[in-house]
Image (tube, rainbow, N blue to C red):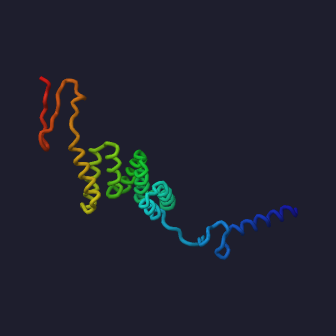
């Protein structure tokens, strides 16, 4: 019986030593207040993205998503971090979910356009950039530049005659005009 009482006292003493009493705890670094407010995970993630720490930003965004839920902001941030890490498939999937939440959210639209450009899906990227540009009212330079690049890349895509066996070729003569040539 005495062993149980003694063990109970040891456990309660050990637990009380782990909790801050008077602001001091052996498990916290010097100068850290365990009772203080933590910084929002999105804010931390944005700062880490600016610093080029994409993996740490992704973790901060996951923390934000666990605290706030899968909002358009957290989904867009997760997609952006995955894009920065080169995880295009994950980024596309997450950014599409963000756009399902809010089809007018410009950062998610822009980043989805970037993912699609990287994956070679230029036509869809152009449409997405046009949506982002319209929602943004053309105010953001980077979105305008992304749209210009998508339009230029879309217009540069030319019919490949190697794919046809009958020897026909589609040749671009001037903007918007094409001529069909044959081997005859």
**Residue at image point 47% right, 55% down:** 58
Q: Position of residue 5 (x, y in %)?
A: 83, 65
Left or right, 81 with reference to 110? right
Residue drawn at (41%, 49%), measured in percent from left and top? 91
Total of numbered circles in the picture? 0
Image position, residue 159 (x, y; %): 21, 35
Quadrant in the picture for the C terminus: top left
Write down the quadrant of residue 80 in the picture.
bottom left
Please say if 42 is above or below 22: above
Q: Position of residue 83 (x, y in %)?
A: 40, 51
Q: Which of the two residues, 153 or 90, is positioned nearer the viewer here? A: 153
Residue 122 in the image, given as x and y percentages of width and height: 28, 44
Residue pushed farthest bottom?
A: 22
Quarter containing the N terminus: bottom right
Q: In the figure, is residue 72 to the left or right of 10?
A: left
Task: Examine the rendered structure and indicate whether residue 134 appears above or below residue 169.
Answer: below
Q: Residue at x 25, y 57 (%)?
A: 144
Which residue is at a point 81% across and 62% down the rendered structure image?
7
Q: Nearer the viewer, residue 129 or 28?
A: 28
Query: Seen in the image, is 22 located left or right of residue 141?
Result: right
């Amino acid at each position: 019986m005495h062993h149980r009482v003694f063990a109970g006292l040891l456990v309660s003493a050990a637990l009380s030593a782990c909790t801050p009493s008077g602001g001091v705890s052996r498990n916290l670094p010097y100068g850290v207040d365990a009772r203080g407010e933590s910084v929002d995970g999105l804010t931390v993630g944005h700062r880490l993205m600016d610093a080029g720490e994409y993996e740490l930003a992704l973790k901060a965004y996951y923390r934000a998503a666990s605290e706030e839920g899968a909002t358009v902001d957290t989904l867009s941030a997760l997609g952006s971090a995955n894009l920065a890490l080169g995880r295009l498939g994950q980024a596309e999937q997450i950014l599409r979910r963000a756009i399902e939440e809010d089809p007018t959210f410009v950062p998610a639209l822009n980043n989805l356009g970037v993912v699609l450009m990287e994956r070679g899906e230029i036509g869809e990227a152009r449409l997405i950039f046009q949506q982002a540009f319209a929602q943004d009212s053309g105010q953001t330079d980077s979105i305008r530049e992304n749209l210009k690049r998508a339009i230029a890349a879309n217009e540069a895509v030319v019919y490949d005659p190697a794919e046809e066996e009958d020897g026909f070729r589609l040749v671009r003569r001037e903007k918007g005009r094409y001529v069909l040539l044959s081997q005859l």
